[in-house]
Amino acid sequence: MDIALFDLDHTLIPFDSGSAFTRHLAARGELPPEFEAQYLEYCQRYAAGTVDMVEMHRFTVGALAVHEPATLARWLEEFREVVAPQVPRRARELVRQHQAAGHACALVTATTRFVAESFGAVLGLEEVLATQPELGPDGRYTGGVVGHACFREHKLAHVQAWLAQRGKTWSEVRRSWFYSDSWNDLPLLQAVSDPVAVDPDARLRDFAASRHWPVLSLRDP
């Protein structure tokens, strides 16, 4: 079994998916104007490796708890149509190349599942490993997280759980690729046979160079 794993934000897409969704909702008047600036502060902490992912998830998803799930589903469908043209052609082609080769492919992202699945649909990636938001008794999001956020070393755990669902273990994987831009993804990058740094941040770029990992860009010219 060969697998190909893909990070989302700043890897397959040249922007932050959560920020894009918050802008979409803010433009509709469904979030306060200051929400995006607060979210971007969390993103900066994420890039610096100092963010508490559960705290960030509680802030972003908790703000949506006032809305009915059906309403959110409708907004997400609209959002998918808005962002589809923003997904780089090179990213789509990379995913298709692995799929055509018969590799089991999955999106592996710290992004909240309902946002990640929108991009998975655009990219043709049915398997989405993401941070699972908690639902309350009323069917609305609480801001909590089910299990561990799909972040840092927990990305590897999510992949292992995904393999187990397919009746496989990590030792049964013959060849594995992981594409990421972020130093935060080092645990999974070091676990695969073929790590690839995609438009990497400064720390990952230096580390990739020291290990002679391939570095590529998926940004459309």
Image: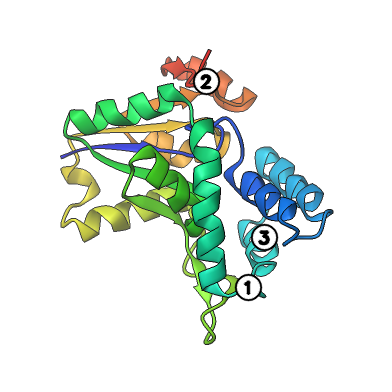
Q: Which residue is mark 1?
A: 67
Q: Nearer the viewer, residue 122 or 217?
A: 122
Q: Which residue is mark 2?
A: 219
Give the spatial CA distance, label 1 vs label 3. 13 Å
Lower position in the chain sequence, tag 2 or tag 1: 1
Lower position in the chain sequence, tag 2 or tag 3: 3
- The number of callouts visible is 3
In percent of width and height, residue 50 lies at 70, 47
In percent of width and height, residue 104 lies at 23, 41
* Residue 42 at least partly seen: yes
For mark 3, give the secondary structure.
Answer: helix
Side of 110 where 38 appears, left or right: right
Side of 158 where 22 appears, left or right: right
The image shows residue 176, relative to residue 118, as above or below, that is above
Q: Nearer the viewer, residue 60 or 81?
A: 81
Residue 60 - label: 3
Say whether marks 2 and 1 touch (CB < 8 Å): no
Quarter of the figure with residue 199: top right
Front tag of 1 and 3: 1
Give the spatial CA distance, label 2 vs label 3. 27 Å
Q: Amino acid at mark 2?
A: Arg
For mark 2, give the secondary structure.
Answer: loop
